[in-house]
């Protein structure tokens, strides 16, 4: 009978099944106190609400693993109830019925499927040396044996009792994908540096204002005959395309510059909360500032990212009069900046009606909560300007002769106008955070 070749992988299932059979033989072997630890965690996650998981202390083996692992135990508990429901009672300390032992041992063996798959992918990633070798001397086989039959993992997981196999499986699978050269492609999609500084529709941030200033300076320079239009870079940033472009007058912005600007924008907030911790609400305020900082200065930011600041900021808005005013500015401006996402005529009444209802509720409810107006006249005038922008973009401009020659103008107007409101909100929120820092410092003195 011909010896199996290493590259046909027919030997791999046999190797994996062999070690799995050994694990089954060890089901009734000695187990450590970790067995009771994990049984107790099954009981806690199955019997108690999530809010009590990290408070329960009937057993000395309290739940002290991260939440993701707690949810893993929660998932296992729904299978465990079909073996022995008594193991899921929190008060049943040191409970080791045969069904409990069988389930917990099998749960480790079954979840090792992740580890087995990762081992196979690691073997595929090994560089194969030239020259023919028999199966037992092939790098594929040797690596599979070293990993699948690892002595340390066998005794720790399948005698002592833990769930390291599937966790190491995730780690090894990550390593395998890196060895297979997939990481650069993933990074190229996660960090789309080739897509340009701004999206096709500029998010209302600092770079929208920067682009507008550059465009205005180039037009003004050409009109005053200070610039030669033939020597200016092609104005692709207003063409509605996702691509890299060069600014005409101002220095072009690179990804590294946006990274530096983002870090500089969030560092004062981070240092403030680090030096003067103010509990969960202080952390929440810092979180909102950092989310807005990333939105204001990030590379190729989408307009939808404004929600990362608006949603958590809602919590602060109902607790502080000053925050409520900033919230109304940010949420009204930020929500209106999302209008270009729905650009067909059929959705126009829907988006206008929904925003009006939400905005009216926001203003009336917060005004009632804090018993008074939350915006000054200038802020109110700015927000009313959004109505003028909407009429211009949806009614006036489509009837103008520039609709076909300069179709990007409504998007530009929306982005730039909203950028002013978002920038103002960011500055006010930052001032509020730093003022609290200064107040705390003054009190200590």
Image (spheres, rainbow, N blue to C red):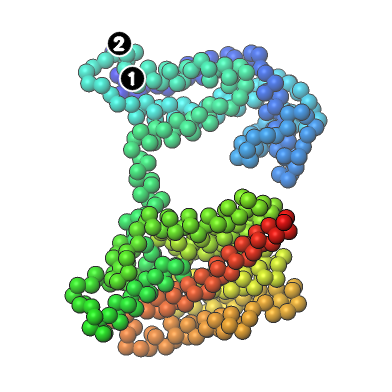
Residue 28 percent location from the top left of the image: 65, 14
Residue 262 percent location from the top left of the image: 47, 57
Quadrant where the image shows the C terminus: bottom right
Quarter residue 132 falls in = top left
- Please give the name of the residue rendered at 73% of the width and 55% of the height, measured from the top-left corner: 444
- Please give the name of the residue rendered at 56% of the width and 27% of the height, measured from the top-left corner: 164
- Please give the name of the residue rendered at 32% of the width and 88% of the height, measured from the top-left corner: 401
Residue that lies at the very extreme toward the left in this rendered image = 230
Which mark is drawn over residue 1?
Answer: 2
- SS state under label 1: helix
Quarter residue 206 falls in = bottom left
Residue 277 percent location from the top left of the image: 67, 51
Viewer-side residue, 376 vs 71: 376
Q: Nearer the viewer, mark 1 or mark 2?
A: 1
Please give left or right for residue 281 compared with residue 166 in the image: right
Residue that lies at the very extreme toward the top in this rendered image = 1
Q: Is residue 366 above or below residue 98?
A: below
Q: Is residue 339 above or below residue 109?
A: below
Quarter residue 136 falls in = top left
How would you rate the neighbour count of disc 1 (Cα within 10 Å): few for under 14, some for 14-19, many for 20 or more?
A: some
Please give left or right for residue 139 compared with residue 301 in the image: left
Please give left or right for residue 33 compared with residue 92 in the image: left
How would you rate the neighbour count of disc 2 (Cα within 10 Å): few for under 14, some for 14-19, many for 20 or more?
A: few
The CA span between labels 1 and 2 is 22 Å
- Residue position marked by numbered label 1 in the rendering: 139
Please give left or right for residue 225 compared with residue 26 in the image: left
Residue 165 percent location from the top left of the image: 53, 26
- Please give the name of the residue rendered at 69% of the width and 54% of the height, measured from the top-left corner: 278
Q: Is residue 186 above or below residue 84?
A: below
Quadrant where the image shows the N terminus: top left
């Amino acid at each position: 009978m011909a010896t199996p070749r290493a590259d046909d992988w027919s030997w791999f299932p046999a190797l994996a099944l062999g070690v799995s059979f050994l694990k089954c033989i060890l089901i009734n072997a000695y187990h450590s106190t970790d067995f009771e630890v994990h049984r107790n965690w099954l009981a806690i996650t199955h019997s108690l609400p999530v809010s009590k998981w990290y408070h329960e202390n009937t057993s000395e083996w309290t739940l002290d693993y991260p939440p993701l692992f707690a949810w893993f135990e929660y998932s296992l508990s729904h299978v465990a109830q079909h073996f022995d429901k008594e193991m899921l009672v929190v008060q049943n300390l040191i409970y080791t019925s045969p069904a409990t032992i069988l389930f917990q041992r099998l749960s480790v063996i079954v979840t090792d499927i992740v580890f087995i798959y990762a081992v196979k992918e690691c073997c595929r990633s090994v560089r194969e040396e030239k020259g023919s070798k028999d199966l037992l001397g092939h790098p594929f086989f040797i690596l599979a044996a070293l990993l699948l039959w690892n002595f340390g993992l066998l005794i720790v997981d399948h005698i002592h009792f833990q769930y390291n196999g599937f966790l190491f499986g995730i780690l090894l699978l990550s390593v395998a994908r890196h060895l297979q050269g997939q990481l650069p492609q993933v990074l190229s999609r996660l960090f789309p540096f080739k897509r340009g500084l701004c999206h096709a529709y500029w998010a209302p941030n600092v770079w929208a204002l920067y682009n507008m200033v550059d465009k205005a300076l180039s037009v003004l320079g050409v009109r005053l005959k200070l610039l030669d239009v033939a020597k200016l870079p092609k104005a692709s940033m207003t063409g509605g395309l996702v691509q890299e472009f060069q600014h005409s007058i101002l220095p072009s912005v690179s990804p590294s510059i946006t990274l530096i600007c983002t870090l500089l924008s969030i560092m004062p907030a981070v240092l403030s909360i680090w030096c003067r911790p103010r509990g969960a609400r202080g952390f929440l305020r810092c979180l909102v500032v950092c989310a807005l900082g990333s939105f204001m200065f990030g590379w190729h930011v989408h307009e939808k990212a404004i929600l990362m600041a608006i949603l958590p900021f809602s919590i602060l808005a109902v607790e502080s009069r000053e925050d409520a005013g900033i919230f109304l500015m940010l949420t009204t401006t930020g929500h209106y900046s999302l209008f270009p996402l729905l650009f067909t005529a059929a959705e126009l009444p829907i988006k206008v009606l929904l925003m009006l209802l939400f905005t009216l509720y926001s203003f009336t409810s917060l005004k009632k909560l804090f018993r008074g107006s939350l915006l000054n006249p200038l802020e109110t005038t700015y927000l009313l300007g959004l109505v003028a922008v909407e009429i211009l973009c949806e009614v006036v401009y489509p009837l103008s002769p520039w609709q076909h020659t300069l179709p990007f103008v409504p998007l530009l107007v929306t982005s730039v106008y909203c950028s002013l409101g978002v920038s103002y909100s960011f500055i006010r929120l930052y001032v509020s955070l730093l003022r609290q820092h200064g107040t705390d410092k003054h009190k200590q003195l």
